[in-house]
Image: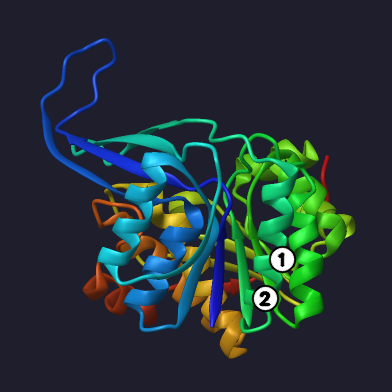
């Protein structure tokens, strides 16, 4: 089982428009509302691929009830802890003209120490049945920046591997717990290390505790930095659409690779193909299955050497 953790859950509202024009008025072509957050999106992809997955995290208020109901409607198994605060909403405006998306994120509810203690107890139980734990997304107000470090330690003690996808202080402070795999993008690497050179920044994350790093580089694909190998993986063609779910699809593929013990080339081939296929889907958490299978055998893989950070 792959356990996904979404501490700052959200009801995701997506508006699709022909073209996003600043200061203009827009006709919305299509609207969706559904349970979201990075971990939830990862579980959606995992379930669509036929893998056993459980969603856990913190939800509260009327939006939290909507969140739970939507998960049930989607057939996703959940073990969510109720909290007093109101689950946040996010708004994504997806432009059909240029395939870009503009995202508005609320901060999320305050989480008390008592609620956090209750969650860590629940998490410890769930992690005992998991091969891989995915820790994804931002932290809600009230939680310390080392919260993912605490969960990483608990997961390891329960016998599960950890995959971390977060940013800023939450990423920096989790590295001391030595997560098995970290998946930042270029901006997140720069924020934590101050290094614009991706190989050099990845080397700094390794020195800070990460056991392996997969850096996402948008349309250029992925770079992987492991104990013995360095890989670049690129999609066979450029795709246009909604990029907001690409990173979550990538994480889902990497989590499957960790659970199955597949080789790094196979993991990266799946991750690039699945993330590109997710760009072609209108909503984060979905992917174009035909495109995924079409891209997979043609992903471009090569080994390369790291450079220093200057």
User: x%, y% of residue 286?
Assistant: 30, 62
> Which is nearer the eye, 123 or 19?
123
Indicate the secondary structure of the residue bearing disc 2.
helix
User: x%, y% of residue 190?
Assistant: 70, 39
Label 1 to label 2: alpha-carbon separation: 7 Å
Position of residue 178 in the picture relative to residue 74 (left or right):
right
User: x%, y% of residue 105?
Assistant: 46, 32
Determine contact: label 1, label 2, CB under 8 Å.
yes
Position of residue 294 in the picture relative to residue 9 (left or right):
left
> Which is nearer the eye, 102 or 237?
102
In the image, farthest residue toward the top: 23
Camera sees residue 149: yes
Position of residue 137 in the picture relative to residue 284 (left or right):
right
Q: Which residue is mark 1?
A: 121
Q: Is residue 85 above or below residue 207?
A: above
User: x%, y% of residue 56?
Assistant: 54, 63
Q: Quadrant of the N terminus?
A: bottom right
Q: How is the image coloured?
A: rainbow
Q: Residue at x 30, y 72 (%)?
A: 75
Camera sees residue 227: no
Q: Which residue is mark 2?
A: 125
Q: Residue at x 65, y 42 (%)?
A: 188
| Label placed on residue 227 | none
- Count the numbered circles shown: 2
Q: Residue at x 58, y 51 (%)?
A: 7
Q: Is residue 232 above or below residue 220?
A: below
């Amino acid at each position: 089982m792959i356990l996904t953790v979404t501490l700052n859950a959200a009801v995701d509202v997506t508006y699709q428009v022909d073209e996003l024009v600043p200061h203009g008025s827009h006709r919305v072509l299509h609207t969706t509302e559904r349970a979201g957050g990075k971990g939830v999106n990862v579980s959606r992809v995992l379930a669509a691929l036929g893998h056993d997955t459980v969603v856990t995290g913190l939800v509260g208020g009327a939006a939290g009830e909507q969140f739970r109901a939507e998960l049930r409607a989607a057939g996703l198994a959940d073990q969510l802890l109720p909290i007093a605060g109101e689950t946040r909403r996010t708004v994504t405006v997806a432009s059909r003209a240029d395939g870009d998306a503009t995202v508005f994120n609320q901060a999320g509810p305050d989480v008390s120490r008592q609620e956090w203690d209750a969650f860590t107890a629940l998490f410890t139980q769930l992690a005992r049945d998991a091969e891989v734990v995915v820790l994804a997304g931002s932290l809600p107000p009230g939680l310390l920046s080392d919260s993912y470090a605490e969960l990483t330690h608990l997961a390891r003690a329960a016998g599960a591997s950890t995959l971390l996808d977060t940013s800023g202080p939450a990423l920096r402070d989790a590295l001391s717990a030595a997560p098995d795999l970290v998946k930042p993008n270029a901006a997140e690497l720069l924020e934590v290390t101050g290094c614009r050179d991706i190989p050099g920044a990845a080397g700094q994350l390794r020195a800070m505790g990460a056991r392996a790093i997969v850096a996402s580089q948008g349309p250029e694909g992925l770079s992987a930095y492991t104990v013995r190998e360095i890989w670049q993986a690129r999609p066979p063609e450029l795709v246009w659409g909604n990029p907001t779910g690409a990173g979550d699809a990538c994480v889902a593929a990497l989590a499957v690779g960790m659970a199955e013990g597949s080789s790094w080339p196979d993991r990266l081939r799946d991750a690039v193909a699945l993330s590109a296929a997710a760009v072609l889907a209108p909503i984060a958490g979905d992917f174009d299955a035909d495109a995924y299978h079409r891209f997979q055998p043609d992903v471009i893989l090569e080994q390369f050497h790291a450079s220093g950070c200057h």
